[in-house]
Amino acid sequence: MIIIISGATHTGKTVLAQKLLERYGFPYYSIDHLKMGLIRSGQTSLTVYDDEKLTPYLWQIVKEIIKTAIENGQNLIIEGCYVPFDWRKDFSEKYLKEIAYCCLIMSENYIENHFSDIIGYENAVEQRLDCKITKDELIAENKRNLLLCKKYGLPYILIEKTYDTEGEICTLLRKFIKTT
């Protein structure tokens, strides 16, 4: 099984992937590591500020990693914000049956009431270098992701009052496992 965890920056994708690793033993792969490896090695002229161009560039590699893991019968969690919302088009039904997707989305109210906590946890699993995001930018990115999840019929976890994504994604995974 492949679990794709997507969402805006600071929504807890990496923390959730780490918790799922600890709970289920599924390794996870951060798309950010791929991005930085390609940038630092000079394999691309794109920079960390080229998000619009990075998504299609990185997705060409990530989708093949996913196919390879499925073909090899391996479990893998892929986490990152560089997953296009029309990702399903890149897989046949054979592959789609093995993929569980979830987008983490924080409501505007949650961000308004917990912004200092969100920023306080930004280094919970990884040390971010020079990462500056404003409350307004975070709200806008999460609103955009919610609209796109609805447009493409993608499952998402809306974080509104409390942050319990691990419990919610485990519920989604149990539903997914029952349907496959």
Image: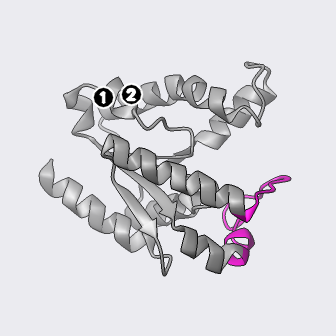
Q: What residue sits 33% from the left and 66% below the top?
A: 170
Kindly state the secondary structure of the residue where label 2 is placed. Answer: helix
In screen coordinates, is 143 left or right of 122? left
Residue 46 drawn at (x, y percent): 75, 24
At label 2, the amino acid type is: Thr
Which of the 4 image quadrants contains residue 110? bottom right
Residue 6 x, y percent position in the rendering: 49, 49
**Residue farthest to the left, as pictured:** 179
Residue 118 located within the stretch drawn in magenta: yes
User: Residues in magenta?
Assistant: 116-135
Numbered badge on residue 43: none
- State the residue position of label 2: 68
Seen at 39% across and 48% down, the residue is 149
Q: Are marks 1 and 2 in contact (CB under 8 Å)?
A: yes
Query: How many residues crowd around disc 2 within 10 Å: few (fewer than 14), some, or many (20 or more)?
Result: few
Q: Image quadrant for the N terminus?
A: top left
Question: Which residue is depicted at the point 45% across and 54% down?
Answer: 146
Tell me the element at label 1.
helix
Disc ID at residue 71? 1
Q: Position of residue 142 (x, y in %)?
A: 55, 56
